[in-house]
Amino acid sequence: MENLDPRVLFDVVDLLGVLANGVLGGAVARQMRMDLVGFVVLAVVSGLGGGMLRDTLLQVGFPVALTNSAYLSTAIAGAVIAFFLQLRGRWTNRVLVVADALALGCWAATGTSKALGAGLGWLPSIMIGVVTAVGGGMIRDIAVGRVPLIFGGNTLYATGAVVGSLQMAVLHEAGRPNWGMAASILTAATLTVLARRRGWRLPGAGEWNVRLPGPREWPRPRLLRRPRRRDRDREQGPEPSG
């Protein structure tokens, strides 16, 4: 156990997330009544889209999903599982939610770490981390013609990716990338699962609006009227006699 490389554990979590998101992509394909091709496409996009988008933006060579066959085969395996099995039940849903939440933190940390290693600053690196974590789901939703769930109406998801990316950025700069990866996975997973269980959401438009008065409600300035000659004479009184 002492000689266990933590990167092996991170790779396991990474592939577990690819499998879980492949299954989730297949579940969307089942809802849309697609054939096996649709299952595979949505599974690959859902499980690998964020990482491929990350590597394309960073221009660091071919995407890892194309150079490491384990990723593509795992995503396709998720599509096959979703195609042949009707994944229903409370425990099945819980397993997929936890696996997806763990992968969220892992992908956020990986994207942030790669961006920092490529020479980007904190803010763009955190953005790359979030894109890595949620990009696949966004592309999947757009592919089936619906608004991405992370844009609102869903429990906290992208927020967990932001927190995980921020943790990774801080610990990476402190020279503790493995600690950053572990912290990102645990924090993002905990926040995401709790948000789903308790229904935590970000406030939407209309909840914190500040109402500005309309044109008719603005106070009208009072115009100062120049006094007439007769009024001025009345205020000054009669002229003194000589």
Image (cartoon, helix red, strand yellow):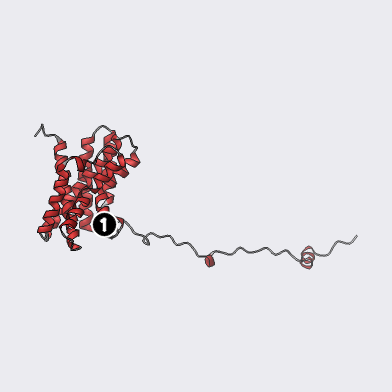
Q: Is residue 165 visible?
A: no
| Residue at screen point 86% across, 61% down | 240
Task: Identify the residue at image location x=26%, y=32%.
Answer: 175
- Name the secondary structure under disc 1: helix
* Residue situated in front as seen by the camera: 190 or 12: 12
Relative to 120, 51 lies left or right: left
The residue closer to the viewer here, 7 or 156, is 7
Residue 56 visible in the picture: yes
The residue sitting at 21% across, 37% down in the picture is: 179
In the rendered view, tell whether residue 236 sits above or below residue 175: below
Instruction: Assign the N terminus to one quadrant of the image.
Output: top left
Residue 145 placement, left or right of 79: right
Name the residue that disc number 1 marks.
143
Residue 75: horizontal and vertical position, in percent? 16, 49
> What amino acid does circle 1 point to?
Ala
- Image quadrant assignment for residue 89: bottom left
Q: Picture coordinates of residue 160 (x, y %)?
A: 26, 49
Q: Position of residue 237 (x, y in %)?
A: 80, 64
- Residue 178's place in the image compared with 152, above or below, is above
Q: Is residue 25 above or below residue 69?
A: below
